[in-house]
Amino acid sequence: MSEIQSQYVKKILRGVGTAPVECGEAFAPSNIALCKYWGKRDPVLNLPVNSSLSVSLGKLGTRTAVRFADRNRIELNGKEVSPEDTFAVRILEFLQLFFPMIGNVHFDVRTANNIPTAAGLASSASGFAALVLALDNLMGWGLDRKQLSMLARLGSGSAARSVYDGFVCWHAGTRKDGRDSFAEPISSDWKEFRIGILEISKDWKPVSSRAGMKRTVETSELYRSWPRQAADDLEMLRLAIADKDFPMLGKTAENNALAMHATMLSAWPPLIYWQPETIAQIHRVHQVRSEGLDVYLTIDAGPNLKLLFTEETEKLVKSFFPGLQVICPID
Amino acid sequence: MSEIQSQYVKKILRGVGTAPVECGEAFAPSNIALCKYWGKRDPVLNLPVNSSLSVSLGKLGTRTAVRFADRNRIELNGKEVSPEDTFAVRILEFLQLFFPMIGNVHFDVRTANNIPTAAGLASSASGFAALVLALDNLMGWGLDRKQLSMLARLGSGSAARSVYDGFVCWHAGTRKDGRDSFAEPISSDWKEFRIGILEISKDWKPVSSRAGMKRTVETSELYRSWPRQAADDLEMLRLAIADKDFPMLGKTAENNALAMHATMLSAWPPLIYWQPETIAQIHRVHQVRSEGLDVYLTIDAGPNLKLLFTEETEKLVKSFFPGLQVICPID
């Protein structure tokens, strides 16, 4: 917990109401970036190098309940986690940011994901978003979504996007104080849009995405071209969403994801989240696409593929990828 | 065959002797780039965007015999190839460059590789180098290696490097006429240096490296950062060879190869030469290196890994990678 972070939180909370309830509860969806967040311009305030664009996963995400308690108690998916565990430490340090004046405050946090934790399915995004929403509920602050987005960002960058449903743009911003780096929803009624989750591994990743992007920014020469690519891709995605132009959306999202992995590959030491099965499935997607099926892929900082397609091809895509978990993000 | 190419060849051949023999014969080694050639600034004269640095593979390469004949006859590894086959067409078009005044000249070319053809083991490099050397022998031109390098380059860029043994630098050059784009040997007595070939697939590649680099240059945003990376890597490799600093050589070569594959990954459509087994073996190299073994990898435009190590660790490396074909490039 840093002084800069505490001051930042204090400014956002200034003037909000407090009508506390006994237990604050909230749900936040996971989100999958179509234009990835990769690289920080400020690691303390989690300010990104580039703006990003995501789609939230509807009912897949994190439900969190938080209350004050006599001792810190963190529960993940029904099991108590040791307070020394990285997972618990990150949550407790984050909560301390909101109560800098109180020396000895303790929390009971119960959080449950219905997505695999840390397998590149952005559970830290939904996790910190749900925590901030639950805290707002607990304290009765009544903050608006933009403010909640700026607070969730401190816990995990991509959490800034998980305070909304549907398509979301997280503006990188340019200010040093981080007050212009927040997410906004992109309105859309693209009900035919589909995402399919192809699970390759539930294993925890060897390198956190936080450490991974740091290494990439510091050591990859090719990363220098990333900000321009991301800026171009984001504009293309906005147009594709506005026009419901699925091939343009799919192509841009896949190219963006593979370019992000390319920056990792060219880091030192090389950062490769992919497993052999990841390559096999990428080739499979390319094979069926070459046969005329309009399906694209995206991959986060993990081994799992997410497929992008539309209602029209859903049956065919499922037949080529058995076990695919299909989500309708826009309803 | 273009007029520009014919004029280029004519200028190099100007003033050379001709004491023809009945059959020209030569051997040229394959080479493995430690700083890759990736991207052309001129596709007609095969002028590269970046200078590259390789090590030749000693006795692994191509042996070629060429003679004039009544009809074109191309033999590869003991089997006659149809004159319509891409392989034969490339050879015959290349040979025509040297005899622009003669309308109807035919050749009998017998070529044999002791390396898998087109599995990313640079058989076109040794192939065109051997062909130029055999032609020089056939015609009695007596060209020097620098001139032979400039001619071999027209057949396949990396062939410019295969006219030498040991470490070789191919200067990209800046001239439009291509006369400053040739290879030169880098003298070294680094007898302890080893390369290990880990064969994953003998299959022909789906996309030629010629087409692959064209697609990358035209569509990859990250490729814009490649020329600077290659220039930096080449200087590091020169220093590493001069100092026999193996970790510096290994790190630079591996980072360079993965950066090249990163530019392909970020091309559109994405260009992925890797197979699932490629990823498995990359992880294996990283695993044994994390345990303290000084072994690095490089990968060309294909699925196969080449391992870099030294005599000191040869036994251990072999024990971790059974079936490894070990080469002593410098003797």
Image (cartoon, coloured by chain):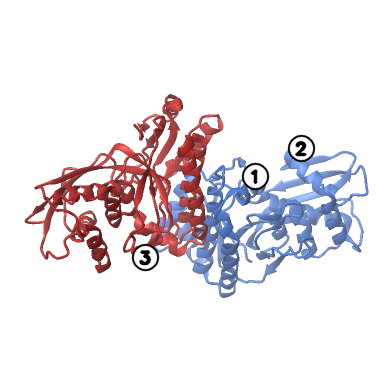
Chain colours: A blue, B red
Q: Residue at x 36, y 32 (%)?
A: B328
**Position of the C terminus of chain A by quadrant:** bottom right
Q: Chain of mark 3?
A: B
In the displayed structure, does residue B153 sit left or right of residue B237? left
Q: Which residue is mark 1?
A: A208
> Residue B113 location, x and y as percent?
24, 42
Q: For residue A222, what is the image quadrant? A: bottom right
Q: What amino acid is at disc 3? A: Lys
**Disc 2 residue crowd, few under 14, some 14–19, many 20+, Cα 10 Å:** few
Q: Residue at x 42, y 47 (%)?
A: B274
Q: Which residue is mark 3?
A: B176
Q: What amino acid is at disc 1? A: Ser
Q: What amino acid is at disc 2? A: Glu
Q: Which residue is mark 2?
A: A80
Q: Secondary structure at mark 2?
A: strand
Q: Secondary structure at mark 3?
A: loop
For the residues labelled 2 and 3, the Cα–Cα distance comes to: 69 Å
